[in-house]
């Protein structure tokens, strides 16, 4: 069996955290679940369980920079949460620019004909999958 490279992608919001998982080769991202962001200690525990359950080797956390590319209040919160993840899980945590991914996820779900009430349930995990897929694609296309 080839060496597994599963990576967990996270779209961290104030209320919910979208979670996506890569395939074993680290090539394709799939929406996995949505978890409550509060209280943060419970969110960290849920993520730690998912990491163990799926034998994850790294995490990608969407960094919500401002449209000007600056770290605003939400990005600062995400950076602190990512640091907690790194300390608690002892795994690499990559921050990845996620500007406009929620809008892209919403557009994708609309195009797929997903009803508004279902879109709300799925948007965070689809956004996490977009963040993770962008990260995987960028990593794969980077010259060695």
Image: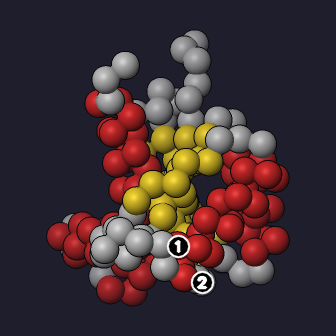
Residue 92 image position (x, y, % from top left): 65, 41
Q: Is residue 132 above or below residue 17?
A: above
Of badges 2 and 1, the one in the foreground is 1
User: Which quadrant of the structure image shows residue 135?
Assistant: top left
Which residue is depicted at the point 29% across and 30% down? 141
User: Which quadrant of the structure image shows residue 130?
Assistant: bottom left
Q: Is residue 91 left or right of residue 62?
A: right
Q: Is residue 40 visible?
A: yes
Q: Secondary structure at mark 1?
A: helix
Checking the image for residue 75, the label placed there is 1
Query: How many residues crowd mark 2 within 10 Å: few (<14), some (14–19), many (20+)?
Result: few
Residue 111 image position (x, y, % from top left): 18, 70
Q: Secondary structure at mark 2?
A: loop
User: Which quadrant of the structure image shows residue 47?
Assistant: bottom right
Residue 123 image position (x, y, % from top left): 40, 73
The residue closer to the viewer here, 36 or 92, is: 92
Which residue is depicted at the point 48% across and 61% down? 62
- Residue at the farthest top position: 1
Which residue is depicted at the point 81% across and 71% down? 41
Checking the image for residue 15, the label placed there is 2
Residue 33 image position (x, y, % from top left): 56, 62
Q: Is residue 17 left or right of residue 25?
A: right
Which residue is depicted at the point 30% across and 82% down? 115
Q: Quadrant of the N terminus?
A: top right
Q: Is residue 79 above or below residue 26?
A: below
Q: Is residue 119 above or below residue 85?
A: below
Name the image colouring.
secondary structure
Q: Is residue 58 left or right of residue 122?
A: right
């Amino acid at each position: 069996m080839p060496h597994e490279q599963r990576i967990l992608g996270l779209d961290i919001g104030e209320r919910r955290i979208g979670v996506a998982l890569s395939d074993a080769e680290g090539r394709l991202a799939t929406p996995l679940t949505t978890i409550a962001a509060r209280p943060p200690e419970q969110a960290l525990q849920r993520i730690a369980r998912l990491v163990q359950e799926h034998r994850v080797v790294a995490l990608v956390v969407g960094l919500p920079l401002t449209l000007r590319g600056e770290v605003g209040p939400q990005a600062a919160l995400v950076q602190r949460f990512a640091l907690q993840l790194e300390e608690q899980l002892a795994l690499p945590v990559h921050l990845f620019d996620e500007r406009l991914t929620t809008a892209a996820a919403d557009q994708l779900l609309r195009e797929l004909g997903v009803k508004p009430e279902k879109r709300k349930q799925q948007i965070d995990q689809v956004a996490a999958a977009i963040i993770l897929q962008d990260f995987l694609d960028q990593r794969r296309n980077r010259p060695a």
